[in-house]
Image: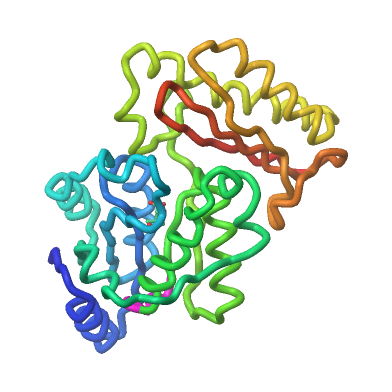
Amino acid sequence: MQVVRTKAEVRKAVRAARAQGKSVGLVPTMGALHAGHRSLVDTSVANCDFTIVSVFVNPTQFGPGEDLDAYPRTLEADAALCEAAGADLIFAPDPDEMYGAAAATTVHVSGVSEGLCGAFRPVHFDGVTTVVCKLLNIAAVDRAYFGEKDYQQLVVIRTMVADLDIATEIVGVATVREPDGLALSSRNKYLSDQQRAAAPSLRQALLAGAKAAADGASGCEAEQVVADVLAAEPLFRAQYISAVDPDTLEPREDDGLPMVIAAAAYMGETRLIDNIRVEG
Ligand code: PAF
């Protein structure tokens, strides 16, 4: 497995793989890889002949006061995980390689990027779609893999790819959880022992909301169930709890299934997100 720093090296590696008739997969990441990323890499390795993992803490998707500087950077361990999983190439560019000093273009997806996390992180999704569009243009892969934990991100990226006729299939991969239900996230590293012990209550709250929805509750009622369960854990401060249409992310307040119930909540300074899909 090679670790490369430049777009030119990625293009060269993809050309060589294509010349051998290989299909190519991309797993875009910000590093600090854990078993959730491992599952994305495993899925790409199982389904593509050549797997690229990008490791880039993308500054444009962090707002002022967010954790850009504190975000964990662990390239050596990330490379070991990718190599063990059978990935072929890591692309780990510097910000200067990724963005020219005079870069003047942003990719903005309206609608699906505006509610949920987008309502609280105004620059976030423009940063995500711009960097993912660039990665898909640099690597021109057959498939790219994203975790369902970041459900809104997945929908925003699918929308971008459809609207801009990008010839890459976007594949969503199920959230990987700790045995107690906590969704794996690079930000779990920020939790104190006490916060970590309490963190699974976000999943428990969503499970309770999903059960209510499956039993006939409206989106609004399901949101209230989630809010009540979460409120019983004093270490959590909910930011939003929203039941939405799985495809359009429009609120499902008065409607029933299908829905995705998505939530973001703070434990101290750490912001955790999770979601649950309830089929009709
Ligand atoms: O999900 C992430 O880690 C990031 O948002 C992504 C898709 C790698 C873009 O920087």
Towards the viewer: 48 or 152? 152
Question: Seen in the image, is 269 located left or right of residue 8?
Answer: right
Residue 220 coordinates in the image, percent (x, y): 80, 32
Q: Is residue 183 above or below residue 280?
A: above
Residue 66: quadrant of the picture: top left
Instruction: Look at the image and give the residue range highlighted in magenta.
Output: 138-143
Residue 218 belongs to the span the image colors magenta: no
Vertical relation: 47 (above or below) 18: above
Residue in front for this viewpoint, 184 or 121: 121
List the single residue furthest toward the bottom. 19
Residue 222, by quadrant, is top right
Tally the marks. Answer: 0
The residue positioned 67% from the left and 37% from the top of the image is 261
- Residue 32 in sight here: yes
Coloration of the structure image: rainbow
Q: Which quadrant holds the N terminus?
A: bottom left
Q: Residue at x 55, y 34 (%)?
A: 264
In depth, the one of 81 and 229 nearer the eye is: 229
Quadrant for the C terminus, please: top right
The quarter holding residue 270 reads: top left
The residue nearer to you, when weighing 142 against 133, is 133
Q: Quadrant of ligand 1?
A: bottom left
Relative vertical location of residue 90 with respect to residue 243 in this rendering, above or below: below
Name which residue lies at 65% across and 33% down: 241
Asked whether residue 90 appears in the rendered view, the answer is: no
User: In x, y percent, where is residue 150?
Assistant: 50, 47
Residue 145's spot in the image, x, y percent?
Answer: 43, 60
The residue drawn where x is 77% and y is 25% is 212
Q: Is residue 191 left or right of residue 175?
A: left
In the picture, measured across the screen, residue 256 lies left or right of residue 235, that is right
Q: Which percent across, then down, holds residue 41?
A: 33, 55
